[in-house]
């Protein structure tokens, strides 16, 4: 069963394909077409779907989107869902900023930092969420470690060694050794 938002009642949308589709392919094709035309399918119970227009400022998230915490549990469709993406090393605020800059959310989407939970909450279609999860794996890395070590010089002058290192490393006055 389909429940329609009042702003969708008069809407008309033409969908054309170049070849016949299976029932499952047709459902995905319709779902993608709706997203491109400012509407989203939102699950509403086991047998019902809502068609919500997000063109008038209304967001699918206000319709009770399903929430996922595991990539394996995400549906195979392009439905709009909420996903909680944990971060171990990167601060959630920084992660949200980077993710939103690299993969800007659609008008119905949102990327929000959850500082207390060490996570980012993403509302988007599943295809985009999968890309964000993959990107998250690449940006959530431990900080590089810098080690300082003092080396005792025997039979060498510290100034001469420092000058040689500056020449070898081509520091050209960027740092002063000493």
Image (cartoon, grey):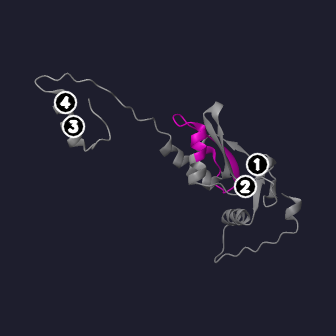
Q: CA distance from mark 3 to mark 1?
A: 58 Å
Residue contact between numbered discs 3 and 1, judged by CB atoms under 8 Å:
no
Looking at the rendered structure, which numbered label has been put on residue 61?
A: 1
Q: CA distance from mark 2 to mark 4?
A: 62 Å
Mark yes or no: residue 140 visible.
yes
Q: CA distance from mark 1 to mark 4?
A: 65 Å
- N-terminal-most mark, 1 or 4: 1
> For the residue carrying disc 3, how many other residues have a C-alpha within 10 Å: few (<14), some (14-19), or many (20+)?
few
Return the residue nearer the eye: 70 or 108.
Answer: 108
x and y percentages locating residue 53 in the rendered image: 80, 60
- N-terminal-most mark, 3 or 4: 4
Residue contact between numbered discs 1 and 2, judged by CB atoms under 8 Å:
yes
> For the residue carrying disc 2, how many other residues have a C-alpha within 10 Å: few (<14), some (14-19), or many (20+)?
many
- To which residue does mark 4 refer? 159
- To which residue does mark 3 refer? 165
Q: Nearer the viewer, mark 3 or mark 2?
A: 3
> For the residue carrying disc 1, how many other residues have a C-alpha within 10 Å: few (<14), some (14-19), or many (20+)?
some
The part of the chain drawn in magenta is 72-97
Residue contact between numbered discs 2 and 4, judged by CB atoms under 8 Å:
no
Q: Is residue 94 magenta?
A: yes
Q: Secondary structure at mark 3?
A: helix
The quarter of the picture where residue 29 lies is bottom right
- To which residue does mark 2 refer? 108
């Amino acid at each position: 069963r389909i429940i329609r938002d009042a702003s969708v009642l008069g809407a008309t949308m033409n969908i054309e394909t170049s070849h016949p589709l299976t029932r499952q392919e047709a459902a995905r094709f319709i779902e993608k077409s709706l997203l491109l035309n400012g509407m989203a399918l939102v699950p509403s119970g086991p047998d019902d779907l809502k068609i919500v227009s997000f063109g008038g400022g209304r967001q699918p998230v206000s319709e009770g989107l399903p929430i996922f915490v595991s990539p394996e549990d995400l549906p195979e469709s392009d439905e709009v869902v909420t996903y909680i993406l944990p971060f171990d090393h990167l601060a959630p605020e920084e992660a949200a900023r980077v993710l939103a800059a690299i993969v800007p959310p659609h008008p119905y989407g949102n990327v929000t930092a959850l500082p207390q939970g060490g996570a980012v909450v993403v509302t988007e279609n599943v295809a985009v969420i999968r890309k964000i999860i993959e990107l998250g794996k690449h940006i959530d890395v431990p900080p590089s470690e810098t080690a300082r070590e003092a080396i005792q010089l025997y039979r060498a002058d510290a100034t001469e060694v420092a000058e040689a290192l500056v020449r070898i490393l081509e520091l050209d006055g960027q740092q002063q050794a000493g």
